[in-house]
Amino acid sequence: MGSPSRPTTFADQASSQRLIDRLAYTYEEAAQLLGVSPRTAWGLCSEGKLRAVRVGKRSVRIPRAEIERFLSAATLASEAKNV
């Protein structure tokens, strides 16, 4: 199904930490954090399930707080389903 796991390097960890420390993310960055494709992240925003903010004419960012809200809601829904 997925690609085989590769060892995590210090550079990978540093890059991941910089990504986590951001206040807002592109579709690609948000997708990486959510574990989905950029197209799925875009679709979630398009459907109104994940709020995105337009920055300038062409740039869109997804706030970190919105990603955290989405993950919390998904976790609660999953837990409720398993009860």
Image: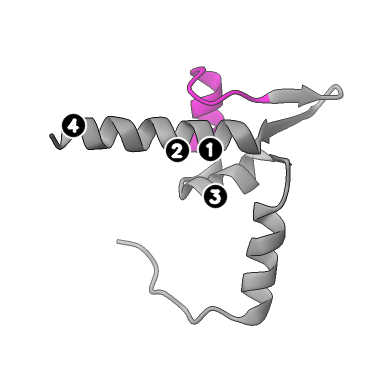
> Looking at numbered disc 2 in the image, what kind of residue is underneath it?
Leu
Residue 12 location, quadrant: bottom right
Mark 2 neighbour density, 10 Å: few (under 14) some (14–19) many (20 or more): some
Rendered position, 21 above or below 1? above
Q: Residue at x 59, y 43 (%)?
A: 30
Describe the element under mark 2 as helix, strand or loop: helix
Residue 33 numbered mark, or none = 3
**Labels 2 & 1 near each other (Cβ < 8 A):** yes
Mark 4 neighbour density, 10 Å: few (under 14) some (14–19) many (20 or more): few
Residue 71 numbered mark, or none = 2
Q: Distance between the Cα atoms at labels 3 and 4?
A: 23 Å
Tag 1 residue = 68
Location of the C terminus by quadrant is: top left
Q: Residue at x 54, y 78 (%)?
A: 8
Q: Is residue 49 left or right of residue 19?
A: left
Give the residue furthest to the left: 83
Query: In the rendering, at what x and y percent does residue 39 appear?
Result: 53, 37
> Looking at numbered disc 1 in the image, what kind of residue is underneath it?
Glu
> Looking at numbered disc 4 in the image, what kind of residue is underneath it?
Lys
Residue 81 numbered mark, or none = 4
Give the residue furthest to the top: 48
Q: Is residue 51 shown in magenta?
A: yes
For marks 3 and 2, give the one nearer the viewer.
2
